[in-house]
Image: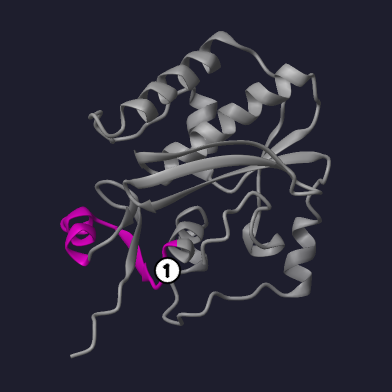
């Protein structure tokens, strides 16, 4: 008997948006929720890209992601290489998590944290952004910072990591970092411009961990 193929379920709109590892968990988030938006993917990397993107770009029945035309790509322009890019990776949600920041042009790693025993991709993206902001302020750089996570960008603007992850012995180090990051945002000002990395036009963000 062949092994059941693993799937990853993205919930854009539901009781608790996120990436789920089983249909049972996904179903619990969409049952009874009017207008729920969700879809399954074959790899965690694809699910992560979809979750950070727009539901309308992935809702079709085709398993292949629609490729933008040259004219559509042109609307996004080219990424600003005078920048840094941040990203996170998580083997599950929650799962082992790490994050890093790189020079967008050279892909030279500027900072890296983890792996942590338990975290979520969204937490990692949030921590990476705050780390990037603190890094650029410390060295007095006027570069912009790219993130492919709309959620993390929103959390940073609100100065609050709106995670549902409950603190325990496995993730205490991560939760402590979250608290420090939130405190940094409340105690510091910054002039850095945060920009959404447009994966569908430019490909994977340079800080991507390449776990395809």
Question: Whole-percent x and y of residue 208?
Answer: 60, 53
Q: Is residue 168 above or below residue 179?
A: below
Q: Is residue 196 above or below residue 55?
A: above
Left/right placement of residue 105 relative to residue 54 reads right
Q: Residue furthest bottom?
A: 1
The percent position of residue 49, horizontal first and vertical second, equals: 51, 59
Looking at this view, is 1 or 59 the one in front? 1
- The magenta segment is 23-44
Residue located 57% across and 60% down the image = 210
**Is 136 in front, or is 77?**
136
Is 37 a magenta residue? yes
**Residue 83 point in image, percent of width and height:** 77, 39
Which residue lies under the disc numbered 1? 43
* Residue 54 in sight here: yes
Numbered label tally: 1
- In the displayed structure, 17 sits above or below 50; it is above
Quadrant in which residue 171 is drawn: top left
Kind of element beneath mark 1: loop
Q: Quadrant of the N terminus?
A: bottom left
Q: Position of residue 167 (x, y in %)?
A: 25, 28
The residue lying at 64 percent from left, 22 percent from top is 134
Residue drawn at 47 percent across, 69 percent down = 58
User: Would residue 61 appear left or right of 203 to someone viewing this image?
Assistant: left
The crowding category of the residue bearing disc 1, from other C-alpha atoms within 10 Å (few below 14, some 14 to 19, many at least 20), is some
Residue at the far top in the pictured view = 187
Residue 191 visible to the viewer: no
Verify whether residue 108 appears in magenta.
no
171 shown above or below 81? above
Which residue sits at x=50%, y=52%?
52
Q: How is the image coloured?
A: one colour
Residue placed most toward the observer, 41 or 167: 167
């Amino acid at each position: 008997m062949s092994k059941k193929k693993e799937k990853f379920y993205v919930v854009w709109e539901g009781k608790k948006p996120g990436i789920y590892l089983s249909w049972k968990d996904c179903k619990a988030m969409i049952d009874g929720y009017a207008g729920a938006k969700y879809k399954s993917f074959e790899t965690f990397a694809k699910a992560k890209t979809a979750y950070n993107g727009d539901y309308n770009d992935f809702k079709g029945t085709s398993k292949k992601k629609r490729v933008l035309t040259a004219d559509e790509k042109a609307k996004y322009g080219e990424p600003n290489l005078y920048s840094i890019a941040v990203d996170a990776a998580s083997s599950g949600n929650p799962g082992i998590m790490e994050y890093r920041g790189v020079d967008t042009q050279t892909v030279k790693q500027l900072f890296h944290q983890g792996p942590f025993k338990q975290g979520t991709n969204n937490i990692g993206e949030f921590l990476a952004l705050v780390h990037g902001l603190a890094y650029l302020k410390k060295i007095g750089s006027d570069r912009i910072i790219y993130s492919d996570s709309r959620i993390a960008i929103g959390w940073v603007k609100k100065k609050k990591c709106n995670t549902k992850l409950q603190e325990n012995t496995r993730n205490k180090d991560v939760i402590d970092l979250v608290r420090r990051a939130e405190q940094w945002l409340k105690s510091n000002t910054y002039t850095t411009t945060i920009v959404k990395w447009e994966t569908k036009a430019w490909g994977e963000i340079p800080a991507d961990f390449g776990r395809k």
